[in-house]
Image (cartoon, helix red, strand yellow):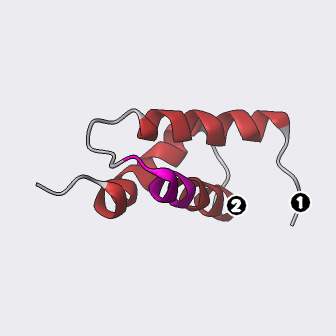
């Protein structure tokens, strides 16, 4: 497992911050950690821009970590 470059860290961290700030995100220590794991896994499978990472992960993140009515 290789380390991420500073640029890759910015891409993943930026996507992480965007999703954490969504009003639907049910924020707690467990969901924050699991979101980070989701983003890392998705980025390792298909590296790209922050926007591409968000497009791939936003729906899954909302399904898994969204607040339930």
Q: Is residue 24 visible?
A: yes
Q: Quadrant of the N terminus?
A: bottom right
Element at badge 1? Answer: loop
Give the labeled residue for mark 2.
44
Q: Which residues are magenta?
A: 27-34
- Local packing at callout 1 (Cα closer than 10 Å; few below 14, some 14-19, many 20+) is few
Asked if the magenta segment contains residue 32, the reply would be: yes
User: Residue sitting at 43 percent across and 50 percent down?
Assistant: 28
Q: Nearest the camera: 65 or 54? A: 65
Q: Is residue 61 above or below residue 13?
A: below
| Main secondary structure along the magenta-highlighted residues | helix
Measured from the top left, where is residue 11 in percent x and y? 65, 37
Quadrant containing the C terminus in the rendered view: bottom left
State the separation of the CA atoms marked 2 and 1: 10 Å
- Residue shown at the point (53%, 47%) measured from the top left: 53
Give the mark nearest the N terminus, 2 or 1.
1
- According to the picture, the residue beneath numbered tag 1 turns out to be 2
* Drawn side of residue 30 relative to residue 67, left or right: right
Q: Residue at x 59, y 60 (%)?
A: 42
Q: Is residue 6 above or below residue 1?
A: above
Q: In the picture provided, is 54 more to the left or to the right than 36?
A: left
Name which quarter of the figure residue 57 lies in. Answer: bottom left
Taking the image as shown, residue 40 lies to the left or right of residue 55, namely right
Image check: 2 left or right of 18? Answer: right
Q: Quadrant of residue 43?
A: bottom right
Which residue is depicted at the point 67% across and 52% down?
Answer: 47
Give the class, few, some or many, for how many residues have Cα within 10 Å of label 2's Cα (few <14, many ≥20). Answer: few
Q: Residue furthest front?
A: 29
Q: Secondary structure at mark 2?
A: helix
Which quarter of the figure has residue 33? Answer: bottom right
**Would residue 56 be visible to someone looking at this image?**
no
Percent position (x, y) of residue 55? 43, 47
């Amino acid at each position: 497992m290789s380390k991420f470059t500073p640029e890759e860290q910015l891409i993943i961290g930026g996507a992480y911050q965007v999703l954490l700030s969504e009003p639907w995100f049910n924020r707690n220590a467990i969901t924050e950690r699991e979101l980070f794991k989701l983003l890392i896994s998705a980025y390792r499978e298909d590296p790209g821009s922050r926007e591409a990472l968000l497009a791939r992960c936003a729906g899954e993140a909302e399904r898994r970590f969204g607040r339930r009515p």
